[in-house]
Structure formats: structure tokens, C-alpha cells
Amino acid sequence: MRIGIDFDNTIAGYDTLFATLAEERGLFQNAPHDTPVGKRDLRDALRRRPEGELTWRRLQAEAYGGRMTEAELLDGVDRFIQACGQSGVAVSIVSHKTQHANFASDGTDLRRAALTWMEAHGFFDSAGLNLRRDDVHFENTRAAKVARIAELGCKWFIDDLEEVFSEPGFPITAKAVLYDPHGEDSVGSELLRCRHWDEIGGHVLGPQH
Ligand SMILES: [Mg+2]
């Protein structure tokens, strides 16, 4: 069995980093009590401003580029991937990530930044998560991402973005798990949603893993 996992905001967490970047730029210095908490709140708060979309895109380019080293490994994802290895379950990381950000000033290679971060967190160490570089796929579009998930024959796919599962071409043979740590996505859909990686492990690998 092979399972697939998204990368940004599913494996790597950026909430603290985005808060740091917003603070460094003084984006909420006039309204410290309204400072948004978490990536999505920050995005929504910025988008309500004139030019806010541009500000948001520049912050993203920094977080996923030059400041990527400060992203956090989300709690439990390492245990989950190691448990997959012990259970003989193959893991692929499938990420919609272009090589360069449109709004970056420094030309950072975003894929290189992500791989360097994975190396630093032991993703490719035999004593660590024990993945191979070949297990990591970066795609230029969401359509290419779901095509890759289909090609790999993933039996499960875990992502923080609901839109991935509704993208045309998402394989009907793959079971979807929405990683939703803040419980903030729209309710009412049939999607299996989990707030923690340990919960995902229970679904994918069984309660005894
Ligand atoms: Mg994501």
C-alpha cells in the first residue's frame, strides 16, 4: 500500500513563522489586540486591506523560501511516517510547489528550500523518517498534483486543503483525509477530517499501530 501526503501546512507548519514575519514588518502595530492568530486568519486579515493580496503573497514567498528553515515539523507527523515504514506502507510526499515564487525578491528556489528543511528534519536518514528523494514530488499545478497522486496509486491522501480532493482528476481510489488542526474548514462535507496526526494514524494504519 502507498499513501500520499501534502507538504506545506500538512507536514511543515508555518503559523509561528507567519506571526514572526508579520511582527517584523509591523503589519499589526496599530492594532496589537487584533493581531490574527494562525496562517489563515492572517491571510484573511491582510486580504481585507488595499494591496493586501500582494502583501500576503510576499509573506508567503519569504516563509516558503528564505525563511523556510524556521518552519515547524507538525506534531506527530514524524511518528506517523515512521509507523508507516514499520508497517510496510510506502509514503510519497506530493506537493504543489513551483520552483520560484512570483513575488520573491531573492529568487530563492522553493523546492530546494523544502528539501533542505526535510534533510534537516531527518526525512532521508535511515534512522529518521527513512524516505528517499524519489518519494518527494513537486508539481507546478494542482491538476498535475492530483495526476501524480493517481499515477502513484495512493490508497490515501492527506492534505490541509479541501480543494485538492475536489480537483478534477483526484483518483476515486484514494481515500481523502483532511488535516484540519484548527477545525476551521467548512463543516458539512463528507470528508474525513482529523485535527491531529495521531488520529490520522488510527484511520490509516489501524488503532494498534
Ligand atoms: Mg498544503
Image: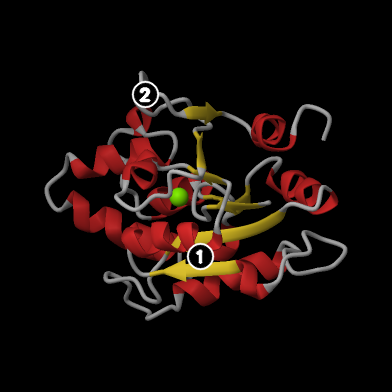
Q: Quadrant of residue 152?
A: bottom right
In this picture, residue 26 sits left or right of residue 9: left
- Residue for badge 1: 67
- Residue for badge 2: 189
- Residue 15 image offset from top left, x and y in percent: 49, 44
Label 1 sits on a secondary structure element that is loop
Label 2 sits on a secondary structure element that is loop
- For the point 37% across and 79% down, the residue is 106
- Residue 198 image offset from top left, x and y in percent: 70, 33
Q: Nearer the viewer, residue 1 or 58?
A: 1
* Mark found first going from the N terminus, 2 or 1: 1
Q: Tell me how the rendering is colored.
A: secondary structure
Is 25 placed above or below 141 here? above
Q: Nearer the viewer, residue 81 or 122?
A: 81
- For the point 31% across and 48% down, the residue is 167
Cα distance between the residues tagged 2 and 1: 35 Å
In this picture, residue 98 sits left or right of residue 202: left
Q: Quadrant of residue 44?
A: top left
Residue lying at the far left of the rendered structure: 50
As shown in the figure, which amino acid type bears the numbered disc 2?
Ser
Is 135 placed above or below 27 here? below
CB at disc 1 and ligand 1 closer than 8 Å: no
Q: Residues within 10 Å of mark 1 (few under 14, many from 20)?
A: some
As shown in the figure, which amino acid type bears the numbered disc 1?
Arg
- Residue 23 image offset from top left, x and y in percent: 41, 48
- Residue 133 image offset from top left, x and y in percent: 65, 74
Residue lying at the far right of the rendered structure: 127
Q: Nearer the viewer, residue 144 or 115?
A: 144
Residue lying at the far bottom of the rendered structure: 107
- For the point 45% across and 60% down, the residue is 63
Which of the numbered marks, if any, corresponds to residue 147? none
In this picture, residue 84 sits left or right of residue 92: right
